[in-house]
Amino acid sequence: MKIIKSIMKNKEFLKLKKIRENNSRHLNQYVFDHSIAVMKAMQKSLSSFKNQKWLKQKIGKYSRGDLLIISSLLHDNAKSRIFREYKDKTTRSPSHELLGAYLFDKYLKGSDFSKKDLDFIKHIIYYHGFAFDAIREAILHPKNRKMILKKFYQITKPYSKELVLMMMADSTGSDFKRMNPAGFKEEIEFCRRLIKNI
């Protein structure tokens, strides 16, 4: 898609090359590099679901799969605006999902995305942090798993499957696998099971 090259050359998006994250998921990883890695992880993940009709379904002018690729590239687009580094050298970008859902469309100026396409991307960006939190809580608290997942589905419907894929791509594109191989494996396997059952 042409729009991917356009996004990657965008002056605001290029600011992410200067933002280096250091937290439980990132070992001094630049947000720009992470965003590219997440997009590539999403592309790889989608190719493993080749025969899934739901990914080929058009939302507006574009398919769910195509829109997930764009969403994965733009999911952290607001981090350059609200990035925080603390005394202990850890970093956070509080509410980057909310701001990112508000700002993402400036990267898509002049494109042919329909309102439905834009709404889809906005919801994936907005809810990707919530999906991460809900899925991690479901893994960590098996006794509450059914209740957590029920609420997750209620809140994120009709984007639940896509958000689980986003969680997988986000984790894969981070340093989490190197930092915690067992935790990464557990998370990815849990997400794969979720996708089959949604």
Image (cartoon, rainbow, N blue to C red):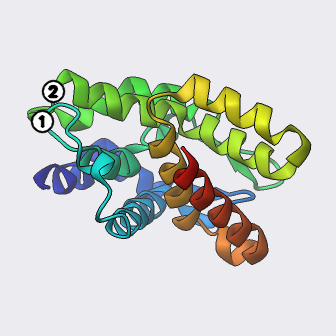
**157 vs 70: above or below:** above
- Tell me where residue 16 appears, x and y as whole percent: 43, 51
Question: Which tag, 1 or 2, sits closer to the chain's start?
Answer: 1
What amino acid type is highlighted by mark number 1? Lys
79 left or right of 45? Answer: right
Would you call the spot at circle 1 few (<14 residues within 10 Å), some (14-19), or many (20 or more)?
Answer: some
- Tell me where residue 91 appears, x and y as whole percent: 69, 49
Question: What residue is rendered at 85% in x and 51% in y?
Answer: 140
Q: Which residue is mark 2?
A: 114
Which one is nearer the viewer's eye here, 16 or 144?
144
Q: For residue 134, what is the image quadrant?
A: top right
What amino acid type is highlighted by mark number 2? Ser
**166 vs 94: above or below:** below
- Tell me where residue 124 appears, x and y as whole percent: 44, 36
Residue 121 in sight? yes
Mark 2: secondary structure: loop
Q: For residue 24, what is the image quadrant?
A: bottom right
Which one is nearer the viewer's eye here, 135 or 39?
135
41 left or right of 194? Answer: left
Q: Are marks 1 and 2 in contact (CB under 8 Å)?
A: yes
Res. 10 mark = none
Per the model, the C-alpha gap separating discs 1 and 2 is 6 Å
Q: Which residue is mark 1?
A: 61
Question: What residue is rendered at 40% in x and 60% in y?
Answer: 42
Quadrant location, the C terminus: top right
Quadrant location, the N terminus: bottom left
Question: What residue is rendered at 36% in x and 64% in y?
Answer: 49
Which one is nearer the viewer's eye here, 98 or 135?
135
Question: What residue is rendered at 76% in x and 34% in y?
Answer: 148
